[in-house]
Image (tube, grey):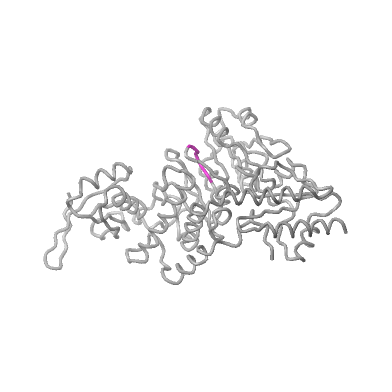
């Protein structure tokens, strides 16, 4: 799952918080172009089961998550479903 | 060579700082926030970690509100011009560096009013003298934490309390104190400091911190790697102040410099070597040392009957690096009574040895005696 945020700095803050406070592994990636109207965004990629913790973490850090996208992979084709 | 100009920039740097710059340029090289490939992401993480390290050192609550500038002067300009508008008043102390003095003066050309709070003959500005100048139009108070001329340490916590009472913002210049003395800056509004002085980064690094809740305009406009489709600058930190490519190798060096300070505990050594030099210099006949004994590492001296630049030239011929003149702080020199003579400034650092200090002071004695 992807949590899209405004900047790479916000993404790194969220990733570090998930690691340090909840021992959750996540990764910062560049947001796929199809998912961002504003262009050039970053996302935190994490396992779907941690969504509630990510929401809580973003709230704790006062990071504005623009949207959450679930990934659906068919063969090599990835579809993003907005939640 | 004996380097005693650490108030201008620290030298040498810790080996890890030099190694980090080389490693960054050799093995990473990417621009932070400008791509999704591995080295660009590593670079972004490094920048983030540097903010975290600085926040830890200075007890700042919001690391993302630390932005990187090319030096303290740029940070000071960003703070002053980002806050002051036509009709506002700005108060500065009479110990300020030209970075503040010239910026504040420029504000007067743009319709603001400048007031100067006069420090005493030791270079200390009293919070009460600042309070007397505050009016309902005062927007910002700028005070240097530690003088780059006399090393005098100002009570910025009291200044912050007074400013808060009157609903006025503060900007403190920590260029000569960050990394030199312990600072808890948790409750401060805005801070500007060099990265290449007490924090051991390389030249081309500086920082501005802006407390959460303060609305400030950016100094520069341009690409940030975020919200690229929008014609407007992002309004969130640090992107609001990161227009254009940042000095990533420099920030990497700064991050390691800050870690070095936290691990090595440099404060006691800095204090000890400064006191040692101050005490030895005090023994020289006809020497005047403005300021107090308790100070950061700037020790400016006047030797009666001798030209400051001439002294520095003679020391240079012996391989001793010191700075003579007005140190870009004419207001401070007026306050200290040294505007006509200038001073010779000795600024030892963490890597200065007592034997270096002894050689320099004995050399100075010989120059004076001959």
Identify the image quadrant of the N terminus of chain B: bottom right
B190 drawn magenta:
yes
B222 drawn magenta:
no
Give the total number of marks visible in the rendering. Answer: 0
Toward which corner of the image does residue B311 lie, by quadrant?
A: bottom right
Residue B163: x and y in percent read 54, 32
B23 relative to A16 in the view: left or right: right
Q: Nearer the viewer, residue A56 or B17?
A: B17
B144 relative to A28 in the view: left or right: right
Residue B104: x and y in percent read 61, 43
Q: Which residue range is magenta in the image? A: B187-191
B338 relative to A15 in the view: left or right: right
Residue B37: x and y in percent read 33, 66
Q: Residue furthest left?
A: A74
Residue B2: x and y in percent read 69, 63
* Main secondary structure type of the part rendered in magenta: loop
Please tell me which residue is depicted at 67% across the width and 61% down the height of the picture. Answer: B3
Please tell me which residue is depicted at 53% across the width and 28% down the height of the picture. Answer: B166
B342 relative to A79 in the view: left or right: right
Q: Residue furthest front?
A: B355
């Amino acid at each position: 799952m992807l949590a899209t945020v405004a900047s790479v700095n916000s993404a790194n803050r969220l990733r570090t918080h998930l690691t340090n406070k909840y021992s959750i592994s996540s990764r910062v990636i560049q947001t796929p172009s199809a998912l961002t109207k504003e262009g050039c965004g970053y996302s935190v990629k994490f396992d779907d089961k941690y969504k509630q913790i990510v929401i809580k973490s973003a709230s704790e850090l006062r990071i504005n998550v623009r949207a959450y996208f679930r990934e659906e992979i068919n063969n090599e084709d990835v579809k993003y479903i907005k939640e | 060579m004996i380097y005693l100009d650490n108030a201008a920039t620290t030298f040498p740097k810790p080996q890890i700082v030099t190694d980090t710059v080389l490693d960054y340029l050799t093995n990473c090289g990417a621009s932070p926030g400008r791509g999704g490939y591995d080295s660009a992401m590593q670079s972004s993480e490094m920048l983030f970690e540097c903010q975290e390290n600085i926040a830890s050192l200075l007890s700042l609550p919001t690391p993302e509100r630390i932005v990187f500038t090319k030096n303290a002067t740029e940070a000071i300009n960003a703070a002053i011009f980002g806050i002051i508008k036509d009709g506002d008043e700005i108060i500065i102390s009479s110990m300020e560096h030209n970075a503040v003095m010239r910026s504040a003066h420029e504000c007067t050309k743009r319709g603001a009013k400048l007031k100067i709070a006069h420090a005493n003959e030791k270079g200390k500005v009293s919070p009460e003298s600042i309070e007397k100048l505050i009016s309902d139009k005062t927007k910002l108070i700028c005070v240097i934490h530690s003088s780059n001329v006399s090393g005098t340490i100002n009570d910025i916590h009291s200044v912050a309390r007074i400013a808060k009472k009157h609903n006025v913002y503060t900007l403190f210049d920590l260029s000569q104190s960050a990394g030199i003395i312990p600072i808890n800056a948790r409750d401060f509004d805005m801070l500007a400091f060099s990265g290449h002085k007490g924090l051991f980064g390389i030249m081309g690094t500086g920082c501005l911190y802006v407390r959460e809740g303060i609305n400030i305009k950016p100094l520069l406009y341009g690409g940030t790697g975020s919200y690229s489709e929008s014609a407007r600058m992002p309004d969130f930190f640090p992107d609001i102040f990161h227009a254009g490519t940042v000095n990533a190798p420099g920030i990497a060096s700064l991050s390691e410099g800050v870690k070095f300070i936290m691990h090595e505990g440099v404060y006691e050594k800095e204090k000890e070597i400064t006191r040692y030099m101050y005490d030895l210099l005090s023994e020289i006949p006809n020497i005047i040392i403005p300021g107090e004994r308790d100070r950061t590492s700037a020790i400016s001296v006047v030797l009666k009957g001798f030209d400051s630049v001439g002294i520095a030239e003679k020391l240079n011929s012996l391989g001793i690096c010191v700075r003579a003149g007005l140190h870009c702080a004419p207001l401070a020199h007026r306050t200290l009574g040294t505007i006509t003579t200038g001073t010779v400034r000795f600024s030892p650092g963490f890597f200065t040895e007592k034997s270096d200090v002894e050689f320099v002071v004995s050399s100075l004695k010989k120059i004076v005696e001959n």
